[in-house]
Amino acid sequence: MDDKNLMEGVLLLEKNVCDLYMHGTLESPTANVHQVFNNALNQSLTMQETIYSAMTAKGWYQTQNVDQTKINTVRQKFQAQQ
C-alpha cells in the first residue's frame, strides 16, 4: 500500500470517527458526557484538517470548482421548496 492510499484510509476513518463523536455530542444525556464527546469531536476535526492539508499539499486530494450557474440553480430549487 502506498502513502496516498494509506492517507486516504486514515482520512476516511477520521471522518467516520467525527461522525460518531458528533452524534454522541448531540445525543448526550448529561452536560459532562456532552463535554467529553464535544472535546473528542474537536480533537478529531483538528486531526482531520491536518490529514486533509497534508494530502492537499501533496496533490492527493483534489477538489473541483463548481460553476456559479450550477450553484444558483440548486439555490433556487431549494428556495422554491420552502
Image (tube, helix red, strand yellow):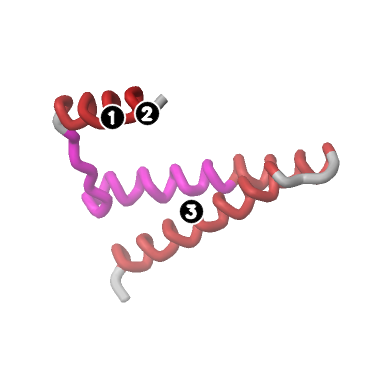
Q: Quadrant of the C terminus?
A: top left
The kind of secondary structure the magenta stretch mainly shows is: helix
Q: Which residue is found at the position 21% from the left and 28% from the top? A: 73
Give the mark, 3 or 2, whose residue is nearer the N terminus. 3
Q: Secondary structure at mark 1?
A: helix
Asked if the stretch drawn in magenta spans residue 27, the answer is no
Give whichever of discs 1 and 3 has the lower sequence position: 3
In the image, what residue occupies the spot 42% across and 57% down? 11
Q: Position of residue 3 (x, y in %)?
A: 32, 66
Residue 33 left/right relative to 60 = right
Q: Image quarter for residue 33?
A: top right
Q: Residues within 10 Å of mark 2 (few under 14, many from 20)?
A: few
**Kind of residue sitting beneath label 2:** Gln
Judging depth in this view, the residue of 21 and 58 nearest the camera is 21
Amino acid marked by disc 3: Lys
How much space separates mark 3 and mark 2, taking CA atoms?
30 Å
The amino acid beneath tag 1 is Lys
Tell me how far mark 2 sits from mark 1, CA to CA: 7 Å
Residue 41, horizontal then vertical, whole percent: 62, 45
What stretch of residues is rendered in magenta? 44-66
On residue 77, the disc is: 1
Q: Residue at x 27, y 24 (%)?
A: 76
* Residue 45 sits above or below residue 78 on the image: below
Residue where numbered disc 2 is placed: 81
Q: CA distance from mark 1 to mark 3?
A: 29 Å
